[in-house]
């Protein structure tokens, strides 16, 4: 049942409970030339996530004789993904600082669970392009990119190109905000704009934290409120991970055998 504010109006415009995430849809194979790809949609936010292997590693790895492979991410908002058109970085001639921050976050989230040694001398490029932005694009990108990476590794493993299974666990992410002192999960754009505190939570299927980004916007918050937001976010991320597992199982039952300790073979 929808929760109501003190004046009797719905707490959230779309009628969600404070701890309720938006409807999640996952579509595999959206970019057929990538080794693995997924379109992730949470409410009106949609992100194309594609993972592609390149048969080389960055120069710094060769120079420093670092063995294994590398994983790196790029994030961009397509010009028509926002309410007012957002010019491409290439046209502006400079990188958007927000995009750089987000792509580093995505890369860190995935490198936390991918064994780079098992990738061999390859770079796994993870491209996240926002098709429609309505809040939570970075968290959707992480949840979707994880699946694209699993599909890409599964393809190479099936071809016996990978000499092992590199993925230790799944990763998913969500946002939690404080609006008028109340914690809300998976904020849309309007909720995000109105929130006093915005927190992004990245976790693994082993219930470990990878990253917590939390900040007050012209506001402060207490340790007690932080604990409450973490608890709500944790439950939401675990739900997302269950949906990731179901999606992978539907794609191929061998992929349902998580957490991949020995790999799907
Ligand atoms: N947004 C936008 N244009 C921008 C940056 C953000 O329209 O250049 C909107 C978009 O809906 C985005 C939301 O503001 O999802 C929140 O942005 P934030 O930087 O908090 O990242 P996100 O919540 O998408 O991870």
Image (cartoon, helix red, strand yellow):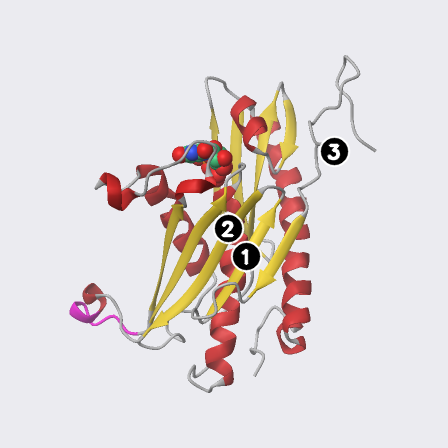
Magenta stretch contains residue 159: no
SS type, badge 3? loop
Location of residue 143 with respect to 235 vertically, above or below: below
Q: Report whether 31 appears left or right of 245.
A: left
Task: Return the residue nearer the eye: 211 or 248.
Answer: 248
Task: Return the residue nearer the eye: 239 or 79.
Answer: 79
Quarter occupied by residue 57: bottom left
**Residue range highlighted in magenta:** 62-67
Residue ID for mark 1: 39
Residue ID for mark 3: 17
Q: Position of residue 95 (x, y in %)?
A: 26, 42
Q: Position of residue 195 (x, y in %)?
A: 55, 24
Mark 3 / mark 1, whichever is N-terminal:
3
Number of the label disc, if any, that sits on residue 47: 2
Q: Position of residue 49 (x, y in %)?
A: 48, 57
* Mark 1 C-beta to ligand 1 under 8 Å: no
Rate crowding at label 3 as few (under 14), some (14 to 19) or many (20 or more) other CA atoms within 10 Å.
some
SS type, badge 2? strand
Q: Position of residue 91 (x, y in %)?
A: 25, 42
Number of the label disc, if any, that sits on residue 96: none
Foreground mark, 3 or 2? 2
From where the camera sits, is residue 68 visible?
A: yes
Residue at position x 27%, y 73% from top? 56
Residue at position x 45%, y 58% from top? 110
């Amino acid at each position: 049942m929808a929760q109501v504010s003190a004046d009797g109006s719905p707490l959230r415009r779309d009628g969600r409970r404070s701890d309720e995430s938006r409807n999640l849809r996952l579509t595999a194979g959206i970019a057929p030339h990538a080794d693995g790809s997924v379109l992730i949609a949470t409410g009106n936010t949609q992100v194309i996530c594609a993972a592609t292997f390149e048969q080389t590693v960055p120069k710094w790895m060769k120079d420093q004789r670092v063995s294994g492979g590398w994983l790196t991410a790029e994030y961009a908002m397509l010009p028509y993904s926002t309410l007012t058109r957002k010019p491409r970085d290439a046209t502006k001639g400079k990188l958007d600082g927000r995009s750089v921050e987000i792509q580093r976050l995505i890369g860190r989230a995935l490198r936390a669970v991918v064994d780079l040694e098992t990738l061999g001398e390859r770079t796994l490029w993870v491209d996240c392009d926002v098709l429609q932005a309505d809040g939570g694009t970075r968290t959707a990108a992480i949840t979707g990119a994880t699946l694209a990476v699993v599909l890409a590794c599964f393809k190479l493993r099936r071809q016996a190109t990978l000499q092992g299974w590199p993925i230790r666990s799944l990763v998913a992410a969500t946002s939690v905000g404080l609006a008028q002192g109340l914690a809300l999960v998976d904020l849309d754009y309007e909720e995000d704009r109105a929130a006093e505190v915005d927190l992004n939570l990245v976790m693994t299927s082993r219930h470990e934290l990878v990253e917590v980004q939390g900040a007050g916007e012209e506001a402060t918050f207490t340790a007690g409120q932080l604990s409450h937001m973490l608890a709500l976010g944790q439950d939401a991320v675990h739900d997302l991970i269950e949906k990731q597992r179901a999606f992978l199982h539907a794609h191929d039952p061998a992929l349902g055998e998580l957490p991949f300790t020995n790999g799907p073979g």
